[in-house]
Image (cartoon, grey):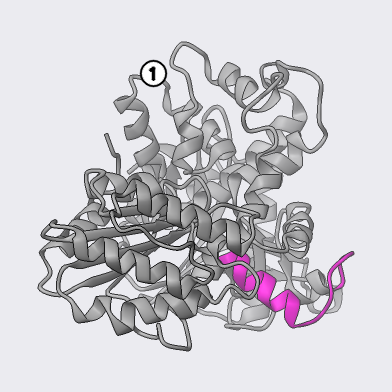
Amino acid sequence: MIIARDNELQLLRETLDSEYSQFVAVYGRRRIGKTFLIREAFNYDFTFEHSGIAGTSKIQEIDQFCISLKRAGLKAKFDKPDTWMEAFELLKDLIIQSKAEKKVIFIDELSWMDTKRSDLIIALESFWNGWASARKDIVLIVCASATTWMIDEVIHNKGGLYNRLNLQINLKPFTLKECEKYLISKNISMNRQDILECYMILGGVPYYWSLLRKELSMPQNIDRMFFAEGAILKDEFEYLFKSLFKNPTPYIAVVTALGKKKAGMTREELSSSDKLLNSGNLTKCLNDLENSGFIKTYNHFGNKKKNAVYQLIDNYTLFYFKFIETKTNDEEYWTHMINMPSKNAWCGLAFERICFEHIPQIKKALGISGVLTDINSWRCVADSENGINGSQIDMLISRRDRVINLCEMKYSEQDYSITKDYYEKLRKKILDFRNVTKNKDAIHLTIITTHGLNRNMYSSNVQSVVTADDLFE
């Protein structure tokens, strides 16, 4: 049973009804469910299905391609091809012999097949432009976890594949609501507090959620997946980046630097960090990581590009840096972490990241789904001569109706209470924002918290409250 992919399923299945041949690209991070989606969409019925193999040579990739052709039923005897051009000629023979009304060709992990000097893309261009697109009975689906490779080589190809795709699907992680729906489908009983904590660790990656066992508590599940002997996700970090980037070292350096900074970093700050250079390579790393869903850029309020802040938003990677990288030997580590200060501090940061991943849900709770908005961050340094205290605001929802929601995100296992000291801090933030930006829009102080807000003498200054339940909408 497939969960939460109704729109993607419909788009894929509609390709079978098209009058002409269709060329489809599906991409998204490792473990996001691309292969499962495609197989479900076409009921596991392919004229040809093949998957590239990581870390092999051109000859080995072509050999495996030929094995897939034989398994698909290619009847003609053939000499072993030396080039991808020759290999795709054999694929044409298989298609010609097929009696299926629509020949669905599924090539998975295409990026792994593109070995050094392989000329794979040239052969793919020739296959599609010179032959398949001239027919009316082919659905060609290419898929890859290496998002940046797919964007550069297929989607934004500057050669013969330019503007040739009929459909592209960037498969996104599940939302909280979709994860809850998935758990229900698997008869796993978990309250929303536990689902929220799971999401802080696993993000919305379906494969990670598929590893949960219904007979175990949430902490026991996390111990089994990450900390027990032979834990299946203990070494996921290494494989994750190797599967996405041919040279993962600079990408790991960037996310490592960002993982240490709660508020994120500007490009200038990143370029001065250890192991990072102020060069075009850094720009490419940042673009690639954002395309792959690991980081997100938030423009500084009032300035679209200068001082943009890059934040690490991938939940698993944040969890890895905080708890897995230390390589604890405690096989019940997460169970023993209950109410520990280091976990509580991490919960606050992880909850903030979840809020950024659920902006549409926050806007819905605020009743502004139909209002055009920008999501910004903002900070200023102290300047005593001009009465500036020095402040940082992680989320500003700047609305076209001349209202700004100044959002404070607070994780709490009970209703959150605004203290006198915290109220004074909020007041200074608003004053700093007014004094520095000179912005005259109405400011609505918005508290986003897990359960709700305790009413006291300071809570009346809050215009809006968003709870974790709202994030599940």
Rendered image quadrant of residue 412:
top right
Q: Residue at x 60, y 53 (%)?
A: 54
Q: Quadrant of residue 17?
A: bottom left
Q: Is residue 312 visible?
A: yes
Let me know if residue 455 appears in the view. no
Viewport quadrant of the N terminus: top left
Q: Residue 410: x and y, percent?
A: 58, 43
Q: Can you give x and y, in whole percent of width and height, for residue 90 in the image?
A: 36, 66
Disc 1 element: loop
Name the foreground residue: 452 vs 141: 141
Residue 272 lies left or right of residue 179; in this view the side is right
Q: Is residue 107 left or right of residue 205?
A: left
Q: Is residue 251 left or right of residue 209?
A: right
223 drawn magenta:
no
467 or 189, which is in the foreground? 189
Which residue in the rendered view is the most extreme toward the bottom? 159
- In the rendered structure, the answer to whether residue 366 lies left or right of residue 118 reads left
- The amino acid beneath tag 1 is Ser
Disc 1 target residue: 189
Q: Position of residue 472 (x, y in %)?
A: 37, 40
Q: Residue at x 23, y 71 (%)?
A: 22
Image location (x, y in percent) of residue 69: 37, 54
Residue positioned 40% across, 80% down in the render: 125
Label 1: few (<14), some or many (≥20) within 10 Å?
A: some
Magenta stretch: residue 278 in it? yes
Which region is colored magenta? 272-290
Quadrant occupied by the C terminus: top left
**What residue is rendered at 41% in x and 87% in y?**
160
